[in-house]
Image (cartoon, helix red, strand yellow):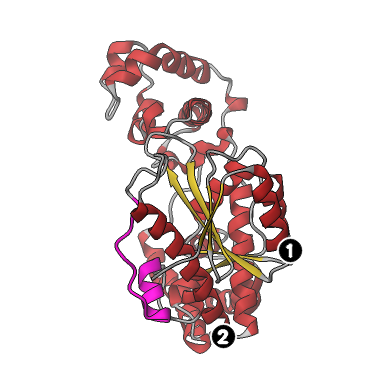
Amino acid sequence: MAIDILWIRDDATLAQHCTAWRKLPFVALDTEFMRVDTFYPIAGLLQVSEGERAYLIDPLLIDDWSAFAELLRDPAVVKVLHACSEDLEVLLRLTGSLPAPLFDSQLAAGYLNLGFSMGYSRLVQAVLAIELPKGETRSDWLQRPLSETQVSYAAEDVLHLAHLYLRLQERLPAEKNAWVLEDGAELVAALGREIAPEDAYREAKLAWKLSRAQLAVLRALCAWRERQARARNQPRNRILREHALWPLARSQPSDLVSLARIEDMHPKTVRQDGETILQLIRDAAALPASEWPPALPEPLPLEATGLLKKLRAVGQREGERLGIAPELMLRKKTLEALLKSGYPDGPYHLPESLRGWRRELMGQALLDCLAAEGEPA
């Protein structure tokens, strides 16, 4: 299909179009980026459409993103993206702002029970009956000039996204549309709640198995790894592999030979940062008990699986009633947090992660389910 494409390659033209876009009810947004050897994504192209044409912004030529940041923050303009977690990182890194209100077409598909976590091509096929060409996602978006195929792919994607939004809007009741925007706001808020380097150890695999003294070492290693990944702009595993963290904290090697024997320890890490890692371990191991982190809670026991299924069924029933993909109803982490608040005998408390319409519609039903489970037969 022939697409009207307009390139934006300078600050003044971008500012001019941003002023025009802010008069619209919505804009569709997409990004192309590279993230092979870096911690942060590198923007290669930004695409915008209002449904009439595709605007392609070359981020390698733009210095002033202030007008675009204002567009992203404008509450009167809905920003439409698809499966946008990485796009949000690109936008935040580039402009310092995040889109609000945010409409994620992948979430909208779930709310219409078209499918959960649907890929963009499948959704376009299902809603617009258009078969998209195979993507250019693996190509080099930092090369210049971009190939005709890349330009066509990028333009088609964002133009169809605008059309997709209009079609989804026709099918979404006002209540569900509000829920899609609520989930979009949560995606944005979650990105804003960046984990502090000192708390990164809580997410490490098997961390709950370590003693408090060992956790102090794990905390130091994870915090250093996180800071170095950001400072060097390298993936975390390039700094120190994930699977090496737990054995490091548990065995606490004291020399380079022992360090090199640690499971999944890359030789380059030993050469480049070995002495630093050993010093981190020594310093953390020398901390007094008063400075050790608290023990981490164990995972739920296998016996809790049945109860978890009953809680999930609360969401599934409500999903069937509302015509929403069941996977969108209650997240596993939320249900586990609810169980951990009082397992096995209660009392239970709704976790902070159960928010908004989900808390309103299912919070009491979940507590009732747990209360019924605790009643004598």
Residue 27: x percent and y percent? 61, 65
Q: Quadrant of the N terminus?
A: bottom left
- Lateral position of residue 114 relative to residue 270, left or right: right
The residue under the point 47% across, 28% down is: 225
Q: Give the mark nearer the N terminus: 1 vs 2.
A: 1
Q: Residue 75 carries which label?
A: 1
Residue kind at label 2, given as amino acid type: Glu
Vertical side of 180 occupied by 18: above or below: above
User: Residue 38, how many percent across, how many down?
Assistant: 43, 34
Q: Look at label 1 and name its amino acid.
A: Pro
- Magenta range is 119-137
The reply to whether the magenta stretch includes residue 154 is no
Q: Do the residues labelled 1 and 2 touch (CB within 8 Å)?
A: no
Task: Tell me if residue 124 is in the magenta stretch.
Answer: yes
Q: Mark 2 points at which residue?
A: 170
- Percent position (x, y) of residue 79? 62, 63
Is residue 317 visible in the rendered image? The answer is yes
Quarter of the view holding residue 305: bottom left
Is residue 363 visible from the viewing direction of this image? no
Q: In this view, does 369 lie above or below 16?
A: below
Q: Is residue 235 left or right of residue 175?
A: left
Q: In which quarter of the image is residue 49?
A: bottom right
Give the CA separation, mark 1 to mark 2. Answer: 21 Å
> Where does residue 196 sit, x and y in percent of width and height?
60, 37
Front in this rendered view, residue 230 or 203: 230
Asked which quadrant contains residue 174, the reply is: bottom right
Measured along the vertical axis of the image, is residue 35 above or below residue 359? Answer: above
